Image: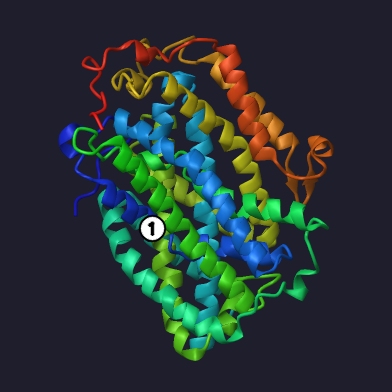
């Protein structure tokens, strides 16, 4: 299969051969991995019992999917990725806000996937072969996973789609075997080793779980969905079908692995750590399937994230090819894996990362969706590419390439979110106004969206001035 040559340029109609079924496949297959499974471990580690853990994960995932899924329709219309598409709201240079947010999200999730996958791989190999567990063996395992991930990401979308098709079936079978393997020791009671509710009370802890383990999953895709829907033709597939496919893919791709993580956390009594207890509690016959899940699943998910990072860096530095950008971010992601392993506990690192990025990313998503609604889904695809061509002008040029009101609205929303977040090592000053409950994502999204509406009263996105027959990406009728 040839290496993908496209970066963040507009995908020609003749190359837009994917469909809604491919979208479901890539969202499901790529997420059946330990990097997503481990988020299901967070609720029991916070001190919640089985039913409270399940309801918090489901509620957060549903809420996040309702916000995130419509973003997939933007790249369906623009034929480029979402950060570039957001130039219609932020300006062709201001869209760098989305590129940076997407880069940080993908970087964190790539590092987390390789980190957790590598820990489980080494634990299984230690049980099977007696391989010593030390800094050298950790380094070798992380490096092997990172190298395999880079190979898939560099070859691009078609390779990742083919990999996801295999993983959708293979990983589902491995997870079913996992349910059988861990079922004898499953309990619905809260794990005493967690030491009670993390935040002292049920509802504050349940809400933290809903955000950290549930909502954070869909939010991770706010800049990624367009990487796949840009290859779907609006002339052949309606917006309604693509939206349904996005919703189904996100729900299945996130809830199946996360609830498996919650189930195995209770079965393995994994209150303070996940990888170690998961390996220790596995029966001997499940060790090889667990090793396969740790390797193949991690490569599939991290490869997808690394592919997105390469696109985002390519958008920030247009002179770099997508392959070169992917190699560069792979080095940074691998460095983050070692930093996470040696410098932080898994629970603290994961919680801090997802809460901060959710608070920063949500207002960007809200502003981009408001712009999509205002312009009726009609964009000038050529004008979105001005920055990539190192040119000037076009309907999205605004003020020297920046839409200042939109950028200021995002910055205000993100600042409010950071000031209202509750992290293991940091308590935002606005928490006193919310009774100590972390609703940073709600505040950041509401403030950013409201500020954007107030600062741009009655203003349509410039592309909306185009007549549908003039726009190269005018949507097909549903």
In x, y percent, where is residue 342?
66, 62
Q: Is residue 151 above or below residue 454?
A: below
In the picture, the quarter occupied by the C terminus is top left
**Based on the displayed image, in which of its 4 quarters is residue 377 positioned?**
top left
In x, y percent, where is residue 19?
24, 46
- SS type, badge 1: helix
Q: Is residue 269 above or below residue 145?
A: below
- The residue shown at (40%, 29%) is 84
Taking the image as drawn, is residue 100 in sight? yes
Taking the image as drawn, is residue 410 in sight? no
Does 85 sit left or right of 437 as displayed?
A: left
* Pick the front one: 334 or 123: 123
* Pick the front one: 119 or 133: 119
Q: Is residue 416 above or below residue 256?
A: above
Does 40 sit left or right of 31 as displayed?
A: right
Badge 1 crowding class, 10 Å Cα cut-off, few under 14, some 14 to 19, many 20 or more, is many
- The residue shown at (57%, 49%) is 216
In x, y percent, where is residue 203?
75, 54
Please, which colouring scheme is shown? rainbow
**Based on the displayed image, in which of its 4 quarters is residue 277 positioned?**
bottom right
User: Total of numbered circles in the picture?
Assistant: 1
Does 18 sit left or right of 446 as displayed?
A: left
**Based on the displayed image, in which of its 4 quarters is residue 266 positioned?**
bottom right
In x, y percent, where is residue 363?
58, 31
- The residue shown at (37%, 10%) is 393
In the picture, the quarter occupied by the N terminus is bottom left
Which residue does the numbered mark 1 point to in the structure image?
28
């Amino acid at each position: 299969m040839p290496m993908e040559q496209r970066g963040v340029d507009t995908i020609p109609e003749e190359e837009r051969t994917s469909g809604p079924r491919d979208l479901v496949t890539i969202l499901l297959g790529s997420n059946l991995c330990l990097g997503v499974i481990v988020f299901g471990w967070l609720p029991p580690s916070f001190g919640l019992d089985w039913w409270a853990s399940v309801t918090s994960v489901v509620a957060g995932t549903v809420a996040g999917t309702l916000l995130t899924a419509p973003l997939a329709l933007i790249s369906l219309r623009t034929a480029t990725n979402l950060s570039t598409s957001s130039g219609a709201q932020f300006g062709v240079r201001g869209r760098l806000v989305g590129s940076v947010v997407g880069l940080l999200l993908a970087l964190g999730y790539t590092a987390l996937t390789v980190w957790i996958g590598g820990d489980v791989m080494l634990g299984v190999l230690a049980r099977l072969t007696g391989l010593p567990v030390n800094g050298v063996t950790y380094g070798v395992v992380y490096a092997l996973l990172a190298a395999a991930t880079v190979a898939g990401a560099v070859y691009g979308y078609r390779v990742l789609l083919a990999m996801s098709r295999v993983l959708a079936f293979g990983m589902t079978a491995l997870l079913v075997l996992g349910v059988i393997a861990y079922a004898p020791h499953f309990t619905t009671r809260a794990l005493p080793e967690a030491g009670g509710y993390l935040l002292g009370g049920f509802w504050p802890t349940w809400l933290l779980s809903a955000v950290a383990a549930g909502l954070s999953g869909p939010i991770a895709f706010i800049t990624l969905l367009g990487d796949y829907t840009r290859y779907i033709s609006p002339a052949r597939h309606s917006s309604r079908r693509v939206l349904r496919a996005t919703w189904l893919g996100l729900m299945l791709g996130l809830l199946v692995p996360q609830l498996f993580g919650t189930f195995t956390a209770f079965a393995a009594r994994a209150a303070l750590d996940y990888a170690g207890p998961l390996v220790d509690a596995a029966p001997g016959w499940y060790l090889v399937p667990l090793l396969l899940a740790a390797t193949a699943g991690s490569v599939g998910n991290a490869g997808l994230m690394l592919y997105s990072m390469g696109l985002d860096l390519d958008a920030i530095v247009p002179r770099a090819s997508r392959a070169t950008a992917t190699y560069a971010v792979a080095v940074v992601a691998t460095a983050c894996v070692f930093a996470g392993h040696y410098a932080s506990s898994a629970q603290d690192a994961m919680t801090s990362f997802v809460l901060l990025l959710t608070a920063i990313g949500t207002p960007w998503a809200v502003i981009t969706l408001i712009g999509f609604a205002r312009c009726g889904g009609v964009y000038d695809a050529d004008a979105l590419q001005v920055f990539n061509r190192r040119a000037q002008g076009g309907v999205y040029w605004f003020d020297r390439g920046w839409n200042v009101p939109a950028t200021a609205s995002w910055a205000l929303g993100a600042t409010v979110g950071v000031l209202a977040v509750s992290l293991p090592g940091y308590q935002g000053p606005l928490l006193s106004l919310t009774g100590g409950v972390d609703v940073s994502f709600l505040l950041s999204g509401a403030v950013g969206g409201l500020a954007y509406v107030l600062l741009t009263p009655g203003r349509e996105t410039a592309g909306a001035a185009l007549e549908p027959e003039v726009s190269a990406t005018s949507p097909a009728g549903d």
